[in-house]
Amino acid sequence: MRAFTYQRADSVTHAAAAAIKPGSKIIAGGTNLLDLMKLQVETPSDLVDINRLPLDKIEETAEGGLRIGALVRNSDLAADPRVRQRYGVLSRALLAGASAQLRNKATTGGNLLQRTRCYYFYDVTKPCNKRSPGSGCAAIAGFNRIHAILGTSEHCIATHPSDMAVAMRALDANVETVDGEGKTKVTSIAEFHYLPGNTPEIETSLKPGEIITAVTLPPPPPGVQVYRKVRDRASYAFALVSVAAIFDSTRGRIRSARLAFGGLAHKPWRVAKADQILSDASADTATFNAAANAVLEGARGFGGNDFKIPLTRRTLHSVLAEITRT
Amino acid sequence: MEMNSPIGPNALDKPGVVGKPLDRVDGRLKVTGGARYAYEMQQEGVLYGFVVEASIAKGTIRSIDTRAAEKAPGVVLVLTHRNAPAQGTGNHREAHPVLTGSQVMAYGQPVAFVVAETFEQARAAAYLVDLKYHRSDGKYALRSNLKEVRVPKPNDAPAADSAVGDFAGAFESAPVRIDVTYTTPLQSHAMMEPHATIAMWDGDKLILHTANQMLNQGQRAIATTLKIPAENIRLISPFIGGGFGGKLWVNADAILAAIASRELKQPVKVALTRQQIFHVTTHRSDTIQRLRLGSDRDGRILAIGHDVFSGNLPSEQTYEGAALQTRTLYAGPNRLTRHRLAPLDIPVASSMRAPGESVGLMALECAMDELAEKLDLNPVELRVRNEPSEDPEKHIPYSSRHLIACMHEGARRFGWDKRNAKPGQVRDGHWLVGMGMAAATRGNPLLLSKANVRLDPDGTATVKMAMTDIGTGTYTILAQIAAEMLGLPTERIRVELGDTDFPQAAGSGGSWGAGSSGSALFEACNALREKLARTAGMDPATARFDDGSIASGELSRKLTDLVGAGMEADGEIRPGRNNKEFSQQSYGAHFAEVGVDADTGEVRVRRMLGVFTAGRVLNAKTARSQAIGGMVFGIGAALHEAMTLDPRFGYFVNHDLAEYHVPVHADIPAIDAIFLAELDDRSNPLKSKGIGELGICGAGASIANAIYNACGARIRDYPITLDKLLSSLPVRA
């Protein structure tokens, strides 16, 4: 860990203004940032602590959705009765992530911004374009069991590790931000996270000095909500593949469907064509196959993660069969 | 006492406190933070060290620039090979000399040591040490380097090869044959407490608070490395947060701290980070194991062959003895076992919980399952038919052996008769459900140990020995033994361990700890009983010790009236002929039920039972905990644990606990371990056998066999992760 200055922000605009300075970082739960600082993967010169800002409320919106403050802890969000009743997929995704202790500290905004778990990213002695642009990608020809099969580039095949963000992607959440001049902005979660492309070090649409204040959820879509996470052990492991599914179906007929995936790409993965295939369709194997094909279009394995292609297909079938059975 | 003859009836045979499920006597200290571990010892004026690891696997240090680190805030010393003192060369394991030159032998080798006033300063400065290397080609992956294997010749392990009869001929002509190859991965001990040391000097005397399983061995090894007399070295280690073999040796943390402290004339403390542990300390080698079993049509083994490949540094002779149990577990007239060692340029491989059996049984016991299927025989019955009447290679009797009883009792309790022998037949929702079993066995060594016990006028007995408790319950069983022998309540027994100023002891490892240290204490207590009896004018042979008194006939005297200012005695146990004339092992049987997700291949253990015989059980609670802990280890070995080597860099890619997976609570279902009554009068005066490793032995194989029974996939490459199962699962789409 390198020496850094520390200040506690007393207002959102103060925090945003302080965060403009190159090298400065916002700290909220710190569950990811501190680990990375100890390994010098992150070397901020200044930390701006936003934990005392009034961003820890969950409120109803006029449209019938929820507005979740950026500092709402993962545990509190998962346990909120409104979330549990109307956004079950979000509650389940949160509880599938990390451990109870981490969820008690981790925040909504921080969860969206957590960094990849790529082994090479975590080791400063190894090449990594995300950590050290231009140094190369050690994962592409290396050990890549946990890496992406969709939306990769020749520069980076890392995945986004969040479960929460996958559920939010299925729920069409929006991310509210504010900059140092107090200007607010709303970005759909679809556009919030970036694919790696030529600049894997740029992971979100956030500009320097811009901070997340809230995530808003539109009114809940009709239907059943499911989150299925496939992993190497029963708890405390990142997703090999995860599926957030929201399905409105009855008696073998699907009215509407939304699917989002974790563990497959640099961002929560959602394919409009797959959702369309599943809308106003018969709940049968042919439909599921077509949806799986749409999701996996362009999928490419790198050796260690080839299995994610059949695994995604099988997991999707499993979820679809389960969800449309009732 | 030297173990040369059977132990007759003794004071432990009557029902008493030995064997009772007593709570740990140190439990309260542990849960309240009162038990202080090496790194927690407070020391005035202590400085903090941080290890800089080599980031190449093989080559030489071309340049090392420490100027920025030396100028960094708080830094008082940067040690490198240029300014480190000359050291004696012990072997790589016991107390590896550090910073000896510019050669890099393995990834993670310490190449600098930064000492500063605070931990954060030392860590930050460590990143400022600028190292440049000449990289040379190395050999890293076991499977890529099998052409250069050699026959290992260690001086502290059995010979690499064994042969009885004509294996090749008998296997060739056997009516039923199994010829399969299993592989097990690189594993890390992943104990809870990291390796840590505080070193300080008092003149020419060195004191080390360090996490170490075998203090006397460590003391001798450090003496060689630091070139000072052993009597000038004191190791203190009253509490250890797990070791599993990873703390059998003196690691770089202790040597670096000792050297820096001598240089600075101040105490220096250091703990390895979790990430550093994977490379800086030892690990278990991966193995490639070929099993050949030939039997007649009734399942009687005619030929049994086990070939094992493992890897280690070119300078090392330690091999993973995965075929050792195959020499003694089953009958059969024609036998062949061979161990070969590939010289590899990766960190030193060494003992990890049940070295040999742990991974050997993961191959042998699955091959037995494969043979049972080929014979259409119940796996339990196959093993019963191959029960030997004597050790089949050494041709000596077993000291005690109740494997069949363990299997039958386990089968009965587990409901083994409900297993469908045909794989893939049982479903519970989307789970494919299967059952598997495997035999457990582990050698029972005895090591030299000494003890001192002293009874004071206040009625308190104090036990002292340089024994360690690595979380197993040693404090508790020693208190029970002393309480039983002296007729005192356990609250009146004070057990002091973990200090080389105390009598020499075996330390913890190899399942020898309780038997060796407990027997030394038993002997010390016997000697004290004799002194007390003589003082009371009674016959030591018939005197009874009970309730703080000694009694003979109608006569009774309070012990506190006999001890004067305090009375003490020493005791000692030495291995003898019993270890050569009898084949000594503990035994058991594992039964597991698993679910395999029919869609995703996720494996979850549903329930598990281990039934064991290990001589006298000294504490029913800590023994059960030990056995269950071993079974959990076995679940991890079967399903989760693997260090992945990246041959481009010669390093372990997943060197943290986020990606080196060990089981978490949610992975451990209803699990139980029971011990059947047994006394082994050839093992030691307690008639006990070691249990620290028995639980892991065979556990993983029972999981693998259950997976096969659940879904029909025979995975011979551990760990059995879901990607290896997908192609065998029912078709989707």
Image (cartoon, coloured by chain):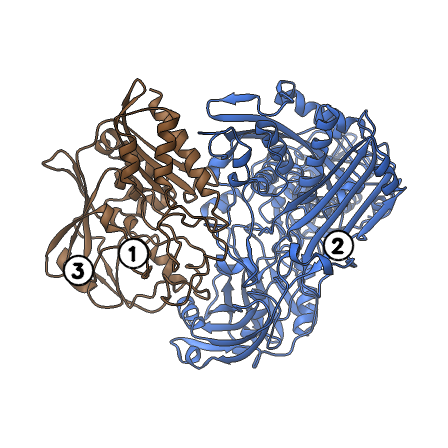
Chain colours: A brown, B blue
Give the residue drawn at x 33%, y 69%: A3
Q: Disc 3 marks which amino acid? A: Ala
Q: Nearer the viewer, mark 1 or mark 2?
A: 1
Circles 1 and 3 on the same subunit:
yes
Mark 2, secondary structure of its residue: strand
- Observer-nearest residue: B628 or B6? B628
Q: Is residue B537 visible?
A: no
> What residue is disc 1 on?
A203
Circles 2 and 3 on the same subunit:
no
Query: CA separation, marks 1 and 3?
Result: 18 Å
Chain letter belonging to callout 3: A
Which image quadrant: the C terminus of chain B? top left
Tell me: B175 left or right of B689. Answer: right
Query: CA separation, marks 1 and 2?
Result: 49 Å
- Find out whether the residues at labels 2 and 3 contact each other: C-beta distance under 8 Å: no
Tell me which numbered mark, 1 or 3, is placed earlier along the sequence: 3
> What residue is disc 3 on?
A16
Give the residue drawn at x 62%, y 72%: B205
Find residue B731 and report its horizontal and vertical position in percent.
49, 29
| A139, above or below A322, in the image | below
Find residue B35 and report its horizontal and vertical position in percent.
51, 51
Q: Quadrant of residue B212?
A: bottom right
Mark 3, secondary structure of its residue: helix
| B351, above or below A96, in the image | below
Tell me: B229 left or right of A70. Answer: right
Residue B340: numbered disc: 2
Q: Nearer the viewer, mark 2 or mark 3?
A: 2
**How many residues crowd around disc 1 within 10 Å: few (fewer than 14), some, or many (20 or more)?**
many
Mark 1, secondary structure of its residue: loop
